[in-house]
Image: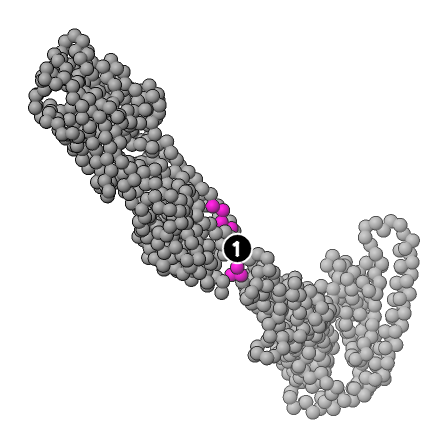
Amino acid sequence: MATARQVLCLCAFLSLLHARAEPIRYSVAEEGESGSVVANVAEDAGLSPAQLSARGARLLSEDGRQHFRLDRASGRLVVGERLDREELCGQSATCTLPFELLLSNPVQFFRVEVAVEDTNDHAPAFPEEWVNLKILETSNPGSRFPLEGARDLDVGSNGIQAYGIAPKNEYFSVDFGSRIKGKRYVELVLEKPLDREEQAEMDFSLIAMDGGSPPRSGTTQIHILILDANDNAPIFSQELYVGQVLESAPEGSVVLRVVATDRDAGVNGEISYQFSQAGDQSHSAFTIDPTSGEIKLTKPLDFEAAETHELSVRATDGGDLSAICKVLVEVVDVNDNAPELVVSSFSSPLPENALPGTVVALFTVRDRDSGANGKISCALEDQLSFSLRPTYKNYFELVTMSALDREETARYILTVTAADAGSPPLTTTQTFTVDISDVNDNAPVFNQTSYTMYVRENNVPTVLVGTITATDADVGPNAKVTYSLLPAHPAGQPSCSCISVNSETGDVFVLRPLDYEQVRQIEVSVSASDAGSPPLRANVTVRISVVDENDNAPLVLYPSQDNSPPSSELVPISAEAGYLITKVVAVDADSGQNSWLSYHLLRATDPGLFAVNAQSGEVRLRRPVTERDAVKQNLIVVVRDNGKPPLSATAALSALVLSDFSDVRLTHSSLATEDDGSSLTTYLIISLVFVSLLFLVFIAAFIARKLCKRKELKDGHVLYGASNLQSSLADAAAAGTLPHTYCYEISLTTGSGNSEFKFLKPILPSLPPQLHATGEGTNNEQDFPCGIVTAEDMVPDNPDMLSAEEFNSLSFN
């Protein structure tokens, strides 16, 4: 609201400035008493007396003198001191006293001019009470004899209007007029020839009268001595001499030289020069050489005090005849006065939301020189946000040009230079320091358009996942940023209860564990607001992506892995290599790398007969079926994901090798009989595996004890225990140093109660003697007990080789 009132006041101020482009003019007679009323200036300015007091009205004059006073209670303009027009304005035709009526809040001023009218308060006065004239008796009628005119300090009709002679004289009359630039003259005119023998001297009074009401007059006595013989008076070469001199000319400088000649000879022809009009003080700055007629300066001149000096020079010959000429000395102005800059009002600090055109300062400039030396120009140095605007005469306003931004510039140092047009020019500078006050015009800004943060599933509660940051270009409370979660959409629902944001630092926390399989991404909106009034805010979207962990093992969909016996796939005996038997289908609830599944043949009745595609899970024949192959083939396929560590699942399936699909019923009945004897085989395998384990543990303990006694093991050899056996074998396999390991094949015939063992050829490269295979029986795969060898990182592309996990669980018949 305060800003709006300032803008309204500014608009009213600017409109009044333009409305009062012409000053308010009054007139007052000189010699008025102090306190006399001139006029009601408040009424003429359209203001009430209450406004004058409320807005601190005051009068400002250029010379600093208070000729008038302002009565704020009544709005009247009264005389502050006795006014003497002759003292204030001299012989000027007009006498005007200008001043300004200045009001504040808002700044407003009115130009007022009061004309001081002349009254007839001065009588004409002659410079001398007696004037002696010597006139040749040979003078012809019509001869003119210049006289020193009277001076009247009044002007206009109150000045000298006429001259007269008393008593009237038949020989002389008075001629009164003007010739040079309005300069008046008084001459005594000879009306009839003189006769010294008849009258050698004459006396009469010369009266000067002004035009006042009532009129005033002045008198001087004229004494005329009629001379005999010397009948030629001096004659000047010019009636008017004009000279120019610089106001900076030093004392003793020659202004000009006047020249007069006299046709008489001897003493009557010798001419001397002197100034006349002793009452005029103009000649006090000059001196004239009585012999040569050179006029010189006795002191420096000041153009600002007087632009011209008018002198009267009298040339007198030896017979006391004289002539008068006029000398006009024009003072040439020199640029010796620098401009003056007076500040009337100045506003600082300035709010940054100030409208363009806001008045910052009001000042006036003036220069006492004249002409080009007195022409003043004002300039504002290197500023785009401010400018100078002339208002009235030499008044200027410093105003804003565009919108201000404290965040861009908090302080302006403005330099105003006032320069005249002299050569060289003189300058005056004035510095205005304008501070810009802050308003809340900048909302917080986030350093990112959106935030994406990551948290691993199964995280600990209140885990820090990231930080959002917003900055505010304002200062103080307007720049204090607080953070908060915005309500979820649709409106009215509470914000996410598992996310929290620190209101001071912007830290983002996850308050409870997350499950990637249930929630993969959480998106919330965070607001950053400042402490301004009203507050400004900005919103940003924060996305929290849940990073998957390998916490789900693969799930086999086909074949079904329930408790029922696995279904058998039928394989014709005529099937060739590559024949598709079945396809294992599995899925993994994880995603990405953790859900990449690979399929491997773990165990088989005849491992060389089958191959499993690692990517698709297709089970195919590796070679053609022969008569020697068992009718029923059992397979265990392991499905492994790509997590770290990997998780796996197994799929059990069987295949029936038939010569004709009509034998399916017969084959199933024979297989049932074979299954009846499998229980005895299972117990036998378990016993064999248990004994083998005890033997291997004993051998491992014995080797470990021997190795501990050796102190030469500096090359990194370590005893392979149960925990690192797999990795050790993997390294050995990579180096090609796996031991020769033999597998036991158990041949069982349907219906027989005995078993037969035989050794097979080694299927792996030779192992060092210190490594031993570990036999291990399985509980769920009773048909294929076999010794187990641990190895890792077998090349999966070779169908004859399995990975370490597959090889861990292999059993052979």
The amino acid marked with disc number 1 is: Ser
Residue extending farthest to the top is: 266
Q: Is residue 545 left or right of residue 21?
A: right
Give the answer, above or below, for where 553 lies relative to 117: below
Name which residue lies at 14% across and 9% down. Answer: 265
Q: How many marks?
A: 1
The quadrant of the rendering that contains the C terminus is bottom right
Residue 784 position, x and y percent, is 78, 77
Name the residue at 35% across, 25% down: 300
At a point 40% along the width and 56% down the height, the residue shown is 75
Mark 1 surroundings: few (<14), some (14-19) or many (≥20) residues within 10 A: some
Depth check: 405 or 13 in front?
A: 13
Residue 435 in magenta stretch: yes
Q: Quadrant of residue 531?
A: bottom right
Specify start and end residues of the magenta stretch as a single range. Answer: 432-441
**Occupied quadrant, residue 476:** bottom right
Q: Nearer the viewer, residue 775 or 30?
A: 30
Q: Residue at x 61, y 79 (%)?
A: 493
Q: Name above or below for residue 381 compared with residue 606.
A: above
Nearer the observer, 386 or 465: 386
Quadrant of the rendered image containing residue 592: bottom right
Residue named by callout 1: 437
Front residue (pair 14, 37):
37
Is 344 included in the stretch rendered in magenta?
no
The x and y percentages for residue 104 are 45, 54
* Residue 30 at least partly seen: yes
Q: Does residue 102 appear in this view? A: no
